[in-house]
Amino acid sequence: MDNLPTDFDLQNWLTLQLSRLSEGGLPPADVRAPFSDLGLESVDYLNLSILIDERFGVAVTAREIFLNSNVEALSHFVLSVASTGRETRTLLPQGFADYTPVSTGGAAAPLFWLNGYEFLEFSDEHLPENRRIYYLHHQGSDGTRAKHRSIEKMAKFYLQTLITLEPTGPYCLGGYSIGGTIAYEMAQQLRAAGQKVDTLLLLSPAGAPKRRREALLRFERRRMMGKSLLGRSIHALRLRIGLVVRWSILKVRDVRFSVKCYTYFVTGRRLPTRLIWDHLWPIYKRASRKYKILSYPGDTIIAHESTLPVEEWTEKLSGSCEVLPPIAVEHLELMRAKSTDPWVKAFVAPIADG
């Protein structure tokens, strides 16, 4: 490739990009400092993979960056990949959702995954090599303002990229949390367009917040069954007050971060990584609250933590639906799972054969 720099120049370029991603902090001479020392998150690895491809035409995955986790090692790896002539990413029209190719695969129906890139890492050994896998990035994951404010519009936004990469089905779709909700709507829109969706994988899908609060209250009532009537009443009152206080605190927090994000946008600057989720989260909360879950006739598998109700999903699924036993972890802990955790293998079993 004619536009490749020398190893020295590439290391300088990588240092500059990492300093921007981490807001400041890699000394130019410290090319062997591990990226973990910079506090980088999965979105940073994803964005760096895009920057490398756009600048040099070399396709490296976020996982490969993670495995070559310092400037010196990554520079050597990028140059070695370039020398093999690995196929670059498909270029997308401006304004389309960005993506990361996770596996080039083969003839099996491709899997498109939304939110929770970590899932693709710890489930990797259970996924077949002949299945192409794509991770679709959040809108605004590059620090720009998120434009789409409803689940339906978000799904349409991602489908532009999906159809560009894979014009015809069948497809496999999946996602974690809000990504599962968007994947559900994508499956609806694909089927409405006459395309086939083989399997829909929903990992702790985000539903209506009201249903989740009601489920929490029911759980707490069951937990307090052995207490006296007075004890149960006091506990219920404390719980409701706690929920109201927490809601108020989060509301103030959302407003504060919205103002902070606005100052970046109005001055033409991109958000730093630490503020991207603070910008997206209020948008996703409003979108999931307004989203109406319609009947879906396709094959679906659901995995969820024990405190998350999934009845609002299962009651709308008229096709084959498997719900795994509840997982005894908190919501975010799902992204810290290991490949040996039983639910991981069971969750990807419908697409594991290729």
Image (cartoon, rainbow, N blue to C red):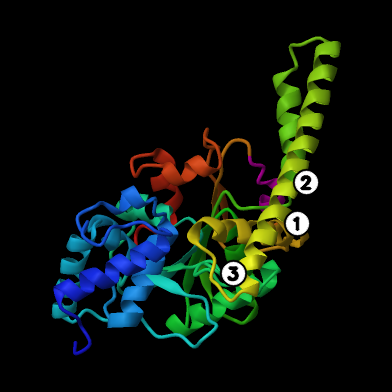
In the picture, measured across the screen, residue 200 lies left or right of residue 223, that is: left
Residue highlighted by disc 3: 187
For residue 82, which numbered disc appears in the image?
A: none
Q: Position of residue 335 (x, y in %)?
A: 46, 46
For residue 289, which numbered disc appears in the image?
A: 1
Q: How many marks?
A: 3
Residue highlighted by disc 2: 210
Q: Is residue 49 above or below residue 36?
A: below
In the picture, measured across the screen, residue 275 lies left or right of residue 126, that is: right
Q: Secondary structure at mark 2?
A: helix
Q: Quadrant of the C terminus?
A: bottom left
Q: Secondary structure at mark 1?
A: helix
Q: Position of residue 131 (x, y in %)?
A: 34, 68
Which of 226 and 86 lies nearest the eye of the viewer? 86
Q: Secondary structure at mark 3?
A: helix
Which contiguous range is marked in magenta? 308-315
- Dividing the picture into quadrants, the one containing residue 279 is bottom right
